[in-house]
Each structure stands twice: as C-alpha cells, then as structure tokens.
Image: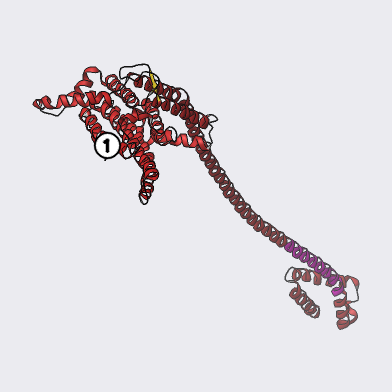
Amino acid sequence: MITASETPNPLLPAGYDIIWSLVVTVIIAFFFFRYLLPKLNAILDERAAKIEGGLQLAEQAKAEAAESKAEVERELVAARKEAAGIREEATADGGQIVAEAKRKAQAEATRIAESAQRQIEAERQSAVVSLRSEVGELATELASRIVGESLADDARQSRVIDRFLAELDSTVDSPVGAGAQSSASSTASSQSEA
Amino acid sequence: MLPGAARHGYEPDVPGEFTLSTAAIAVPILAEGEDDGGFHAPGIEEFFPDAIFGSTELGSFFGFDRIMLVRLVVVAVLLLLLWLATRRASLIPSRGQSIVELGVGFVRDQIAEQILGKERARPYLAMLTTIFFTVLAMNLAGIVPFLNIAGTSRIGLPLVLALWVFIVYLSAGVRKHGLGKYLKAQLFPPGVPWPAYVLITPIEALQVFVLRPATLTIRLVANMMAGHLMLVLCFAATHFLLLEGGGLIKLTGLLAFAGGLFITLFEVFIALLQAYIFTLLSAIYVNFALEEEH
C-alpha cells in the first residue's frame, strides 16, 4: 500500500473525477436528448415523408399516364370502329344508289320502249286507217279496171268495199305486217272472185 | 514494454497487482533515465496531474485538474461543432449536417437496430448515440495537440457511462419482466439441472451486477491509458534521442518519431473502435435484459 499512495491506483475513481464526469455526461446528454436528436429525427422523418410522398406522386403520375394511354387507346379503337362502320354504310349506300340508278334507268328504258311501242302502234293505226281508204280506192280502181264499167254503180261499189273492209278488219287484228300483206292479197283475191 | 504491460495488465480481477507491477517497472526506468540526463519515462502519474484548484486526493469531491479541463474543452468543442453543423439543418443536408447524420445513422443502423431490432431500439437510441459521441470525442482528445490526453483515460467518465448503461439495462429488464421474473431469468437460466445453479447463479450474478459495467469501464480506460503511454514514450524518446543522443544515435530518434506518428494514427483507429465497442456492448447488455429467454 505504500506504493499505491505514491502512484495513485488508476482503477480507483476520485470523488471529483466522478463529479466532473457526471457534469460532462449530463451536459452532453442534455444536448443530445433535448436538441440534437429531436432536430435530426424531425428532419429525417420529414425527409423520409418527402421521399415517400415523391414516390407516391410518381406512382400516381404513372397511373394517370397509364389511364390516359388506355383512354387514348379506347378512343382510337372507337374511332376505328366508327370509321369501319361509316365505310360499311357508305359501301351499302353506294350499292343502294347504284341499284336505285339501275332501277331508274331500267324504268326509263322501259318507259321509252313503251312509248316507242305506243307511238309505233299509233302510227300503225293511222297507217291502217289511211290504208283502209287508200287500199279500198286502189282496189276499187283496180277492180273496176279489171271488170270494167259494171262496177261503176255507187251502191254496188260501196257494198263491195264494205265487205272488203270487213274482211280487212278481221285481218288487221292479226299480226300487222303479215296481216296487211295477207289482207291485201286476200282483198285482191276476193276482188278477183267477185 | 511498458505499454504492452499496461494493455495486458488490466485484468478486472487483479487491479492491485497491476499497479504494483507497473510501478515496479516504471521506477527503474525513471531512475535510469534521470541518470542518463533528462529522459522522462511516462508512468501512471501522467494521469494524475497537479490540481488546478481544489484537492486531487482520492476522497476529495472538490478538485479540478488538467484532465477535467480537457473534458470541459472537449464538451465545448463537441457541442459547438454539432450545433454549428445542425444549426441550419434542412432537408437537403449541408456538409457538416451530413457528417453528423452519418454518425447518428451509424449508431442507429449499425449498432442499435442491428442488436435490438427497429422497434426495441427506439427508447435507447438517444442514450447509445450520446455514449458513442461522448466516448469518441473524449478518446480523440488524446491525439489533439495541446489537449494531448483522452478524457476517458481517467476512470471517472467511463465509470459514469458504464453505470448509466448498468442502470438502464437493469431497469429495462425489471420494467419488461418484473423484478422477480427478471432476476430469475438472469440468475437461474432455464434448461439447466438444478445442482448446476450452485455454480451458475453466482457467476451470473457477478456477470450481471459487476462484470458487465466493470469490463465496460476498464476496457475503455485501459485502452486510453495504454495509448497515451505509448504516445508519450515515443515522443519522449524522440525528444531525448534527438537532443541528447550523439552521432548516429540521433537517427534512432527519427525512428522513434515515426513510431509516434504511427501510434497517433493508430490511436485514431482505437478511439473509433473503443467508442464502437462501448456502444455495441451497451446495446448488447440492454438486449440481454429485454430477451425473453436466454
């Protein structure tokens, strides 16, 4: 113990050493507990929240972008569908228009043909009427030339002509060209018989 | 020789022997040095400077010496630097703020949450961070010019910090399990045949109530003392050899200086390592107290 009193034992704490150590520790602990750590933790928490918020925002923006992309795609599909519909309709309309035009043209053609037919008929009728008198006259003249004066008497003449015309009428109802020809020939033959 | 003896001499169970042997070694060197002309060999007295005021007797509660002054300077510088670095703390950290955040984050992520887990670490984060920064700053004072001695190289500060940890882990255990269950879990570990408790219980009691805080204290103070002794030895030898040595002996002074330089850098590493170990073990002891079964 004599040596221990000369050189102090470093493992035995002196009272004042403990006191000053406590002072030092309390000061540092107070600074850390009351100032530094609350301040740093607040900042760290805020930063973490900011980062999290940023990530969330990015996520949201991503979702929105995807949403708008899907929207655009949907619109595109709808537009395509619409275009296809319009095209189909147009095709159908076109076909209808063509068919309509065809039908109209057909009708026009038919009408023209009919009117032509009617005109021809009318002309034939008038031709028949004019023929009726002219053929009668011609036949009479021809017959009178053949049989001479005997047929100059009007009464007889008109009778012969009426008979002849009646014959002719019956032939007129039959086909035009042939009927006219045959009636003409039959007139001639009946004239000759008479 | 001396620093080595100091490093290995601090066994918690043989403090008396250590002091005696160190003194026995120190005295002859000192005597020899004085004979050779002014070589100052470092000894335990290094850590017990004269009082600036008051008394530095063992039993004195009112005294102030150079090491206490160093501690106060370290506190002032540490708090000033931390305050400056975080004064305008913002979301986008400045350089200083980044460094402080790095330190705080290291204690939180690498020590507290690693050992205790995220949730359980929360109530102890402030204590562990305080201890880490205190020990680190006090250790580094040992290589700061004009301070030149670690605030932790006197046993008071390591002891106060270790007692803080001691009280915290005891109260954590009692709060979590209740006094009876905590003591039972600590002193009578389950899964052991009952006769073994004759051996295990005293060992466990010694462990929980003495050895954990004692080893925390002694590990730190011994490392810091040893580091300081090595530094003093190297630079004293440099001084002596360069000034007093003749001819080629002066060159060996350069060698001693290189050794001192190396030990200075080594002390930076030791300062960090001891701060880390002290904080890590504190977290581990708290974890022991909180564990369900062990």
Q: Quadrant of the N terminus of chain B?
A: top left
SS at circle 1: helix
Residue B250 part of the magenta-drawn span: no
Span highlighted in magenta in the image: A108-136
Q: How many marks?
A: 1
Left or right: B220, with A72 as reference point:
left
Residue B61 point in image, percent of width and height: 35, 16
Q: Residue at x 44, y 29 (%)?
A: B74
Residue B234 point in image, percent of width and height: 35, 41
A188 w.r.t. B201: above or below:
below
Residue A85 point in image, percent of width and height: 60, 51
Q: Residue at x 47, y 32 (%)?
A: A44
User: A64 or A135, which lies in front?
Assistant: A64
Left or right: A67, with A116 as reference point:
left
Colouring style: secondary structure
Q: Residue furthest left?
A: B195
Where, by quadrant of the figure, is residue B286 drawn?
A: top left
Q: Quadrant of the C terminus of chain B?
A: top left
Q: Residue at x 39, y 41 (%)?
A: B239
Dot 1, crowdedness within 10 Å: few (<14), some or many (≥20)? some
Q: Main secondary structure of the magenta part?
A: helix
Q: Could you tell me the amino acid type at mark 1?
A: Arg
Where, by quadrant of the figure, is residue B60 drawn?
A: top left
Residue B117 point in image, percent of width and height: 33, 32
Any part of residue B151 in sight: yes
Q: Which residue is mark 1?
A: B7
Q: Residue furthest bottom?
A: A146
User: B41 or B98, which lies in front?
Assistant: B41
Left or right: B104, with B86 as reference point:
left
